[in-house]
Image (cartoon, rainbow, N blue to C red):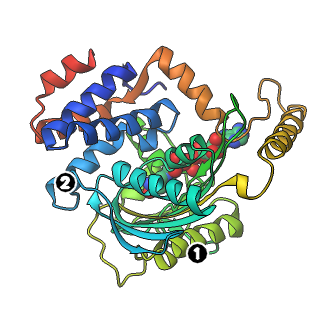
């Protein structure tokens, strides 16, 4: 059954989100950075990290758990290493500032490690990998999720112990070539994708979710029950292992704090991110690296498709395909999410009628 939705042109959607953030108190620059990030996530097919996050952002803002117009503060500086504090600012802004710092330091030193703490939700982590790749750098990003209950069960566990702890690894290509952007939650699906299924009144696929007793279920609502269910880590013990590593790298090594119960859980979404940026020119001949990369990708993609019409893709490609389609056709937003966005707008002084006029729906 088709879910009820509105379809909004991406440029108009950017303007709605910008107007909403401006009314909330963001500078024009901050409003644009956040709106662009969220709408890009929608365009790239990741509705879980798109404009549907806005009601949670407004809720955290009004609850004093998110600060507008913040910039990173360097709390420890070792040249090729830095620890920065996001001051509970808009994550899309402070995480990009941390990324720019990592880029500058990697250019200077060949490799840089930047630990970001106290960032409000940083959104789609691939954004930061794409930025590093555009600067000609390879990057690894380990992220943990703090200030709320855990959602993901460890392998063999019947209850949650982690956030969805995403990892992103990006590698640039040669001139005119797309970067590889491997960017995923370490749960089989991001919580936002279960939220989208709930909003659409649809079951989730097999093997993604367990209920509060640890039993497999297709009902997305278990994640919002009390006690709540858990998402399942991808790749069994291997994905669970990566989730633990993201928690430890961002939370312990990077000093962002962890999901351990001694730390606060106020119902917000705070991310820690440990970024490692590498200048490939320090490792080898750039032309040889690009040529080898090209050969591997061509060989990989030459594998015969197991199913007709579903060719082998490389990471970053599905997002480019989704983007091209949604630029043309608009961004579908389930009605429940759209209603929540309009209500969030009203709460910060953007009247519903004005939002609808900007959106053109
Ligand atoms: P996903 O399961 O859709 O996986 C996406 C990755 O897999 C991308 O790199 C994509 O290019 C690649 N991919 C997808 N299909 C492919 C195919 N057929 N062949 C080759 N590669 C393919 O993503 P997800 O786990 O649902 O995560 C969605 C987003 O949520 C990510 O951008 C992540 O950063 C974000 N996230 C953020 C937070 C946070 O707290 N900020 C938490 C969790 C997830």
Instruction: From the viewer's perspective, tell me whether residue 349 is left or right of residue 199.
Output: left
Residue 171 position (above or below residue 264): above
Instruction: Label 1, secondary structure: give it.
Output: loop
Residue denoted by label 1: 157
The answer to whether residue 190 is visible is no
Residue denoted by label 2: 61
Comparing 161 with 69, the one in front is 69
Is tag 2's residue or tag 1's residue first in the polypeptide sequence?
Answer: 2
Q: CA distance from mark 2 to mark 1?
A: 34 Å
Query: Quarter-wise, where is residue 296 in the image?
Result: top right
Say few, some or many: other residues with alpha carbon within 10 Å of mark 2 (under 14 / 14 to 19 / 20 or more).
Answer: some
**Residue 149 in the image, given as x and y percentages of width and height:** 37, 69
Identified at 58% across, 40% down, the residue is 134
Comparing 125 with 4, the one in front is 125
**Residue 194 in the image, given as x and y percentages of width and height:** 47, 48
The answer to whether residue 74 is visible is yes
Residue 115 position (above or below residue 187): below
> Within 8 Å of ligand 1, the CB of disc 1?
no
Query: Quarter-wise, where is residue 106 in the image?
Result: bottom right
């Amino acid at each position: 059954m088709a879910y009820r939705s509105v379809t909004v042109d991406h440029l108009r959607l950017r303007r709605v989100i910008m107007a909403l953030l401006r009314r909330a108190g963001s500078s024009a620059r901050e409003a644009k950075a956040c709106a662009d990030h969220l709408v890009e996530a929608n365009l790239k097919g990741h509705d879980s990290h798109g404009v549907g996050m806005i009601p949670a952002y407004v809720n955290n803002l009004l609850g004093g758990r998110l600060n507008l117009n913040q910039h990173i503060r360097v709390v420890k500086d070792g040249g090729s290493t830095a620890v920065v504090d996001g001051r509970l600012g808009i994550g899309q802004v402070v995480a990009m500032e941390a990324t720019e710092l990592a880029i500058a330091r990697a250019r200077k030193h060949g490799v840089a490690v930047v630990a970001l703490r106290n960032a409000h939700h940083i959104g789609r982590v691939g954004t930061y990998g794409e930025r590093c790749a555009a600067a000609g750098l390879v990057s690894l990003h380990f992220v943990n999720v703090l200030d709320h209950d855990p959602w993901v069960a460890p392998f063999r566990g019947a209850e949650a112990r982690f956030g969805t702890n995403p990892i992103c690894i990006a590698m640039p290509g040669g001139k005119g070539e797309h970067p590889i952007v491997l960017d995923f939650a370490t749960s089989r699906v991001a919580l936002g994708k279960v939220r989208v299924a709930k909003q659409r009144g649809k079951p989730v696929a097999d093997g993604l979710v367990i209920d509060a007793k640890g039993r497999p279920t297709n009902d997305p609502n278990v994640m919002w029950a009390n006690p709540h269910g858990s998402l399942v880590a991808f790749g069994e013990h291997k994905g669970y292992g990566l989730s633990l590593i993201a928690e430890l790298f961002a939370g312990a090594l990077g000093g962002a704090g962890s999901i351990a119960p001694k730390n606060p859980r106020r119902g917000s979404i705070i991310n820690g991110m440990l970024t490692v940026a590498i200048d490939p020119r320090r490792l080898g001949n750039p032309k040889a690296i690009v040529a080898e990369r090209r050969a591997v990708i061509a060989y990989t993609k030459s594998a015969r498709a197991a199913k007709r019409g579903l060719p082998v893709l490389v990471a970053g490609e599905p997002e480019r395909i989704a983007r091209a389609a949604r630029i043309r056709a608009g961004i579908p937003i389930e009605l429940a999410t759209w209603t929540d966005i309009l209500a969030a707008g009203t709460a910060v002084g953007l009247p519903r009628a004005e939002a609808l006029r900007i959106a053109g729906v």
